[in-house]
Image (cartoon, grey):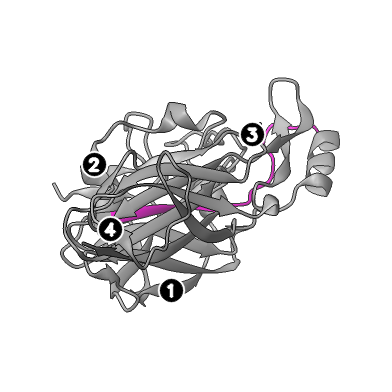
């Protein structure tokens, strides 16, 4: 079976509980790979035009002209399957081609809330359960020649299910569609001393602390319908940072901030390679409603 890479990541209320221990191989870019897909806008009702842009990393740097084949999958996931998307999305019969290139613009399918949301009409599938932020997602497939098949989950905005008219009205008035977060420039210091370091002249084998940051508005507070209390409350987004490099050693591939943590920075340890040369770093910032921002930072290691 063809390998699949899910470029979405879960960002629960406590980020650390969701980070798998997958080893340094997941953060090291040894071959071209889709690391993330940014959706503009980050959340949209069915019928809305959305631009999908991929971050494709390779050992020599980002491939801004990568030729990906894009498609929506229309196969809901049966209860008997425990994957990110239905196994049927790996075939071609459930796909709708959207185009090719590093990005594509397409309308969210009119059937998105019935296939992947609370409005399911087929007797073969029960209504989908929302995630912990109340969200639903349309599967998007991105195929890059020679790389694992990548899937993104595009957040769709659907009406509330099983809510009173009063709650539905209150929720509709209070809810704001998600916006993508915004990364600020990466900073780096020498581990232990805290001294700032110039990324264009990193000593070989140096141990650094890399710090990603975002503006305070990136972690949004949003309306949430609590099905247990049947009341409209609020949540705040958690933030997760994915770290990747073309050389060197990252302490972990994922860090972040829980929803109740107001800090706007997240750091990771990185050891520069022993030999001189150019190194590429990639940072992917995700909020817990599916918003994404990403950047590449070029580093020069010197003897």
Residue ID for mark 3: 261
Foreground tag (4 vs 3): 3
Q: Secondary structure at mark 2?
A: helix
Label 4 crowd bin: few (<14), some (14–19), many (20+), radius 10 Å: few
Q: Going by the image, does 172 lie left or right of 144? A: right
Q: Secondary structure at mark 3?
A: loop
Mark number for residue 24?
A: 2
Q: Earlier in the sequence, mark 1 or mark 2?
A: 2
Spot occupied by residue 166 in the image (x, y as percentages of width and height): 86, 35
Q: Earlier in the sequence, mark 4 or mark 2?
A: 2
Magenta part of the protein: which range?
Answer: 150-164
Residue ID for mark 1: 104
User: How far apart are the alpha carbons under marks 3 and 1?
Assistant: 35 Å
Foreground tag (1 vs 4): 1
Verify whether residue 9 appears in magenta. Answer: no
Mark number for residue 93?
A: 4
Q: Residue at x 36, y 41 (%)?
A: 84
Along the viewing direction, whichever of 52 and 270 lies nearer the viewer: 270
Q: Secondary structure at mark 1?
A: strand
Foreground tag (4 vs 2): 2
Dot 2 and dot 3 residues touching (CB under 8 Å): no
Placement of 119 over or under 29, stated as above or below: above
Q: Earlier in the sequence, mark 1 or mark 4?
A: 4
Along the viewing direction, whichever of 81 and 259 lies nearer the viewer: 259
Q: Going by the image, does 86 lie left or right of 50? A: left
């Amino acid at each position: 079976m063809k390998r699949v890479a899910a470029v979405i990541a879960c960002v629960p209320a406590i980020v650390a509980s969701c980070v798998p221990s997958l080893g340094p191989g997941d953060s090291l870019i040894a071959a071209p790979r889709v690391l993330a897909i940014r959706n503009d806008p980050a959340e949209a009702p069915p019928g809305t035009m959305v631009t999908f842009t991929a971050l494709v990393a390779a050992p020599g740097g980002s491939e801004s002209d990568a030729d990906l084949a894009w498609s929506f999958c229309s196969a809901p996931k049966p209860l008997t399957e425990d994957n990110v998307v239905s196994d049927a999305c790996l075939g071609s019969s459930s796909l709708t081609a959207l185009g090719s290139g590093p990005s594509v613009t397409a309308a969210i399918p009119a059937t998105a809330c019935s296939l992947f949301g609370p409005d399911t009409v087929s007797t073969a599938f029960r209504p989908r359960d929302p995630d912990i932020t109340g969200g639903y997602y349309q599967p998007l497939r991105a195929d890059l020649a020679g790389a694992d098949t990548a899937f993104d989950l595009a957040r769709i905005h659907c009406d509330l299910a099983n809510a009173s008219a009063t709650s539905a009205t209150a929720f509709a008035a209070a809810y704001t569609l998600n916006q993508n977060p915004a990364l600020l420039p990466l900073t780096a210091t020498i581990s232990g001393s805290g001294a700032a370091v110039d990324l264009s002249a990193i000593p070989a084998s140096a141990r650094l602390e890399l710090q990603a940051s975002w503006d305070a508005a990136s972690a949004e507070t949003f309306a949430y319908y609590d099905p247990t209390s049947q009341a409209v409350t609020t949540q705040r987004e958690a933030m997760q940072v994915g770290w990747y490099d073309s050389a060197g050693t990252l302490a972990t591939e994922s860090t972040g901030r829980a929803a109740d943590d107001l800090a706007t920075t997240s750091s990771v340890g990185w050891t520069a390679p022993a030999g001189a040369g150019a190194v590429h770093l990639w940072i992917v910032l995700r909020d817990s409603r599916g918003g994404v921002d990403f950047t590449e930072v070029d580093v020069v290691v010197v003897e």
